[in-house]
Amino acid sequence: MRAGCTVSRLSAWAKSGPEEPLILAAPRRDATIAVVISAVTAVVFAVVANRGALSHIQRLDDSWLRLMISARTPPVTVIAKIFNVLGLVYVTLPVRIAIAGYLTFRRRWWHLAAFAAAVLLSEILIGPVKAAYDRPRPSGSLVATSGASFPSGHAIATSVTVFAGVIALVPAGRRRVAWGLAAAGFAMGLSRAYLGAHWLSDAVAGLLLGTSCALVTAVLVDRVQRGRRRRHGIPQATPPRAARPADRP
C-alpha cells in the first residue's frame, strides 16, 4: 500500500462522523472563571515569593502540620498513603494515556488538544517553578520525598489530570459541574500535607496551578475551535439530532 493512500485514508477517518461538540458551552463565563482562578494562583505565588509574607504563611503551615501530627491514626494514615500513591506518575501517566486513547478513538481532536495542552503546560512548569522557589520540605515525612517542596507536584499532576479529564470527557452542563466538584475534592492534595511530605500552602498552590492549566488551555483551544467553525460556516451550536421515525410519537 502506498504512503499517499494510507495518509488519505487516515485523513478521511479523522474527518468522518458528526462535527465535534464545542469544548465549552458558555465561553465568556468559563473564560471569566479561568481568569479569576489564574489571578488567585498568581497572587498566591507572589505572596509566597515575598519573605515577609512567607513568614506568616509558614506559621500557618506549622500549625497545620502540628494539627495533622496530633490527629494521625493508623486507618487515616493508610488512606492518606493510598491517595499519595494515586498522585504518583505510575498512576497519573497510565490514566493520561487512557484518556488520550479514548479521545483519539472517539475522534474528539479538539478535546484531545485541550487535554494534552493542559498536561504539557503543567509538566513544563513544575520543574522551573520548584527550582525558583526552592522551599525546604517539612521534616519527618511518612513517605519518600525528593526535590523542593513548593508547589506540590502531586497536587499539580492530580488536579490538572482530573480537571482537564473532566472537561475533555464530560459534556458541558450540570454533569460537568458535578464531576468538577468531585474532582476538586479528589485533587486537593491534602494527603501530602497530612503525611508531612508538603506544607499545606504547597498543596493549595499546586491545586491552583494545575486547575489554572486545565481551565486556561480549555478556553484557548475552545476559541480556536470556534474560529475554525466560523471560517467554515459551521453553526456554533450543534443542532439537535433529528428523531428517527421509530422515535416519533
Image (cartoon, rainbow, N blue to C red):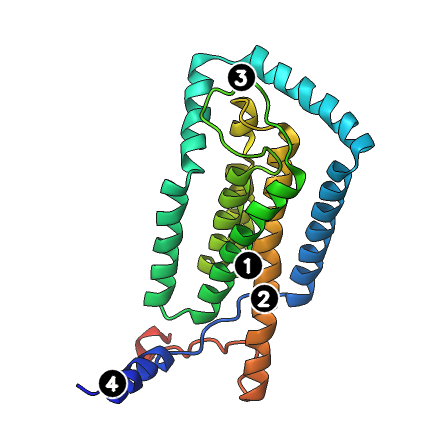
| Foreground residue among 235 and 110 | 110
Residue 173 circle label = 1
Residue 207, image x and y in percent? 59, 42
Name the amino acid, label 3: Gly
Marks 1 and 2 in Cβ contact (< 8 Å): yes
Q: Which of marks 1 and 3 is nearer the N terminus?
A: 3
Q: How far apart are marks 3 and 4 (CA)?
A: 59 Å
Q: Residue placed farthest to the left in the image?
A: 1
Residue 140 circle label = 3
Q: Nearer the viewer, mark 4 or mark 2?
A: 4
Residue at the spot 57% in from the left edge and 78% down from the top edge: 236
Q: Which of marks 4 and 2 is nearer the N terminus?
A: 4
How many marks can you see?
Answer: 4
Q: How far apart are marks 1 and 2 (CA)?
A: 7 Å
Residue 171 seen? no
Q: Which of marks 1 and 2 is nearer the N terminus?
A: 2
Q: How crowded is mark 2: few (under 14 residues within 10 Å), some or many (20 or more)?
A: some
Residue 162, image x and y in percent? 48, 48
Looking at the image, residue 63 lies above or below residue 6: above
The residue indicated by pointer 4 is: 3
Q: Residues within 10 Å of mark 3 (few under 14, many from 20)?
A: few
Marks 3 and 4 in Cβ contact (< 8 Å): no
Q: How far apart are marks 4 and 2 (CA)?
A: 39 Å
Query: Which SS class for mark 4?
Result: helix
Name the amino acid, label 4: Ala
The residue indicated by pointer 2 is: 25
